Image: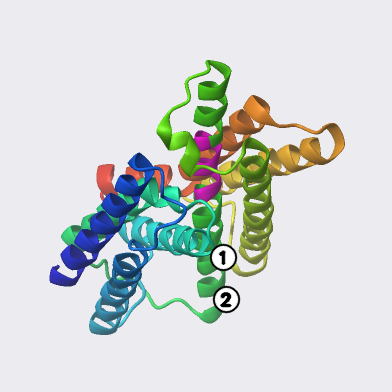
Amino acid sequence: MTLALLAALAYVLSAGLLARGVAADRATRGYAWVLPALIALVLHVAVHVTTWRTAGSLDLHFFSALSLVGLGMAILTTLYGATGRMAALGVIVFPLAAAALVGYAAYGHVHTDTLDWRLQLHAWCALLAYATLGIAAVLALLLWAQERALRRREFHGWLRALPPLTELESLLFRTIAVGFVLLTATLLTGVLFVENLLAQHLVHKTVLSVLSWLAFGALLLGRWRRGWRGATAVRWTLAAMALLMLAFFGSQFVLEMVLKRV
């Protein structure tokens, strides 16, 4: 729990430095936030690795998966920010990663059967897809907020921390494209390696995941063929991400937290 709390504090410190930079209109020029962000990432990884080694098994249940997705989002945010693009993402993502990690540390490890490499590949593809598309959802919300502020001629200071509208939109679709590839890999490895994918406890996950994949695919196709952008892109992104969240986290919450099934 100590490592998790230290990581959470480092995340919050990094987010605070970024928030101060946004308020002072220098979020894209200051890099004081990078060191605490890197410390948080290292400690976050250490929490999971230490727990897995102690328990002797990989844990991918609700809180563990949520924490790993938060870790993936935090890593992507740090990479985006360190290259001078969208460091302001950390104001939103880092506290979410901290909360997910603390939740995992408080709940504890859930002992499960050892997964073979094929199921582990499927699981890691899914976690990477969730993390990448989670970043896309945050970008979509920022795009919506930016468009809304500009349309109302409300020139807030935080707008200067974001790239121009067209660049933010381009970044959103590139992120969705990467996430779509990872989600495709998740579904393919599921078909190849998961036994009885349409079993009662898996059918809802499978159906919702496929619906999300179709929605993201339709959005990318609409962007390519019809130039979809703005509010249309935001709505499709958030709807597709909501389906994806329900596919795993919604069903796992009901199974583990409500029905107490592991």
| Above or below, 223 relative to 144 | below
Q: Is residue 108 visible?
A: no
Q: Check if residue 136 falls in the magenta segment.
A: yes
Read off the magenta span.
Answer: 135-142
Rounded to the nearest angstrom, the CA distance separating label 1 from label 2 is 11 Å
**Residue 217 in the image, given as x and y percentages of width and height:** 73, 44
Numbered badge on residue 58: none
Which of these two is toward me, 63 or 176?
A: 176
- Give neighbour class at mark 1: few <14, some 14-19, many 20+ (Cα, 10 Å): many
Q: Secondary structure at mark 2?
A: helix
Task: Tell me the quadrant of the picture where the N terminus can be found.
Answer: bottom left
The residue lying furthest to the left in this view is: 2
Q: Residues within 10 Å of mark 2 (few under 14, many from 20)?
A: few
In which quadrant of the rendered image does the C terminus lie? bottom left
Residue at x 26%, y 73% (from the top left corner): 47
Mark 1: amino acid? Cys
User: In which quadrant of the rendered view does residue 208 lie?
Assistant: top right
Q: Residue furthest right?
A: 225
